[in-house]
Image: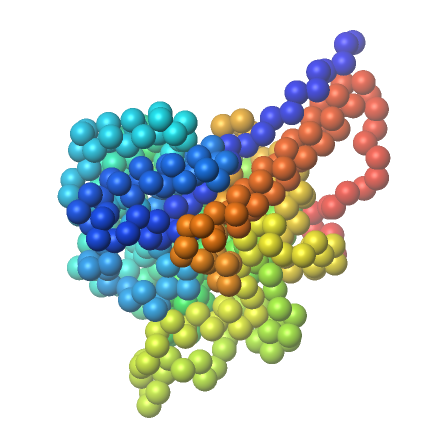
Amino acid sequence: MPSKPFAPKFMRLGVLTAALQELTPRNVRDEDPDRAIEDWLSFAQELGADNIQLSAALHPTESDVPPEAMLDPVANTLDLRRPFDAARAKRVQTAMQRCKIGISDIAYFDNMLHHDPAIRKKKHDFMVRVFDAARLLGVEAVCGFVGRNQTLSMDQNLEQLATDFVPLLKAAKARGLTYRVEQCPMPGWTTGDNWHNNIAYTPGAWIAIHRICERHGVGDEFRIHYDPSHAILMGQDTRSIFQYLKDQGYGFLIAGFHVKGQVIDSRGVSAWGYGGQTMERGDWKGGKPVGDPGKAWLKQVAFSEHELPGTARHDPLAYLQNRTVDWLDHQLAARELLPLDVAKTHLIVEHEYPRARIQDKDLLAPILQGSLAFARKIDEAAGCMFALQNEVLASQDIPVQGRGREAFRS
């Protein structure tokens, strides 16, 4: 038998445009909203990306969430105050061709199960406008959250999901789109004590939600945009999550990746534990919420900090303790355990490292260039290792050496 050729496959590298919220000055973009997309396409070309993940959000004048309540501020790079029509789409596509940069998907991160019907409708209406823009731009997916009704239990939220989230999936299906859910638990979304405020926060929840979606004919429209930083928040490791999904027959759920890490402060864990409840944050006084709503995020940042890939020290012990992301094993496990078409899979750098969230293009550019280059090389290394071990060596019956990291092994 001839040997299989060495033919590694690599993912499509991109960057979420919320990395630099005001690349285009607000007074310019408010008058000419698509200029913000054109400028980001040019910036992505400068950074060395293949794609952008286009960030959409309610305009600051329309949002119900104050900026100080957002740990990681969103960006309305895609401005939908005016209808996104064929003319706007053509302008963006022309810029894409000029810059040779694609759009992986459109990302709108908001609470789709908000307890207030009027606010929930506003968010749903905006999401449908995102769907329409995605269809006109020819992208295959949108990325967002499920959310949580703060007044209901988890099981009650599953019931509400069937009535209030499934219609969104049906709207996506009508437009030929997939809805990819990022699994951030969003603990700081409320000054209350709920930690899990996006119910699609972990594999067990993804499976429960997908079963509901299947019963309503939209199982193919619900997928996961996996972000390993949130696994770290839950005390999980990527390889075990992927193995669990494979064992349960749900490996197909993961359809894209955010490249964002989490660095755990062991002192913070000692004080509050994983998912522990902080107290005296400063967002309550006299028995009611007051003051800075951003302090609700102390539920999370008391023991963790977001990592921009490449900015955290190489720490093998932290990898083994699931206290930061082992990027090489992340990319290997994706290839070894998930039924991916690797060459068509998007790997999106999401910049949320607070101390490096510099809103100055000249200062931020080399930081993002370095992180994107790091992510690309890690993916290339994983692709080469996988092809060599699982294709070339396997075709010649040559064993792979060593044990490697194993799922569920403590």
Quadrant of the snapshot with the C terminus = bottom right
Residue, far front:
362
Q: Is residue 299 left or right of residue 384?
A: left
Q: Residue 79 at x, y = what percent? A: 24, 46
Q: Is residue 210 above or below residue 396?
A: below
Q: Check the picture and name the quadrant holding the N terminus.
A: top right
Whether residue 267 is visible to the viewer of this picture, yes or no, is: yes
Residue closest to the eye, 216 or 269 = 269
Q: Tell me where residue 276 appears, x and y as whole percent.
A: 54, 73
Expressed as whole percent of the image width and height from the top left, the position of residue 118 reads 17, 59
Q: Is residue 163 visible?
A: no
| Residue shown at 78% from the left, 23% from the top | 393
Count up the numbered dots. 0
x 54%, y 26%: residue: 343
- Locate residue 79 relative to residue 347 in the image: left or right: left
Where residue 198 sits: x, y (%)?
40, 57
Q: Residue furthest left?
A: 82
Q: Nearer the viewer, residue 224 or 69?
A: 69
Which coloring applies here?
Answer: rainbow
Q: Is residue 294 left or right of residue 261?
A: left
In the image as oriented, which residue stretches furthest toward the top? 1
Q: Nearer the viewer, residue 270 or 9?
A: 9
Task: Name above or below for residue 310 compared with residue 104.
Answer: below
User: Vertically, is 4 above or below 199?
Assistant: above
Residue at the image position 50 percent from the left and 36 percent from the top = 48
> Which residue is drawn at the image coordinates 37% and 36% (left, top)?
41
Left or right: 234 as drawn, with respect to 183: right
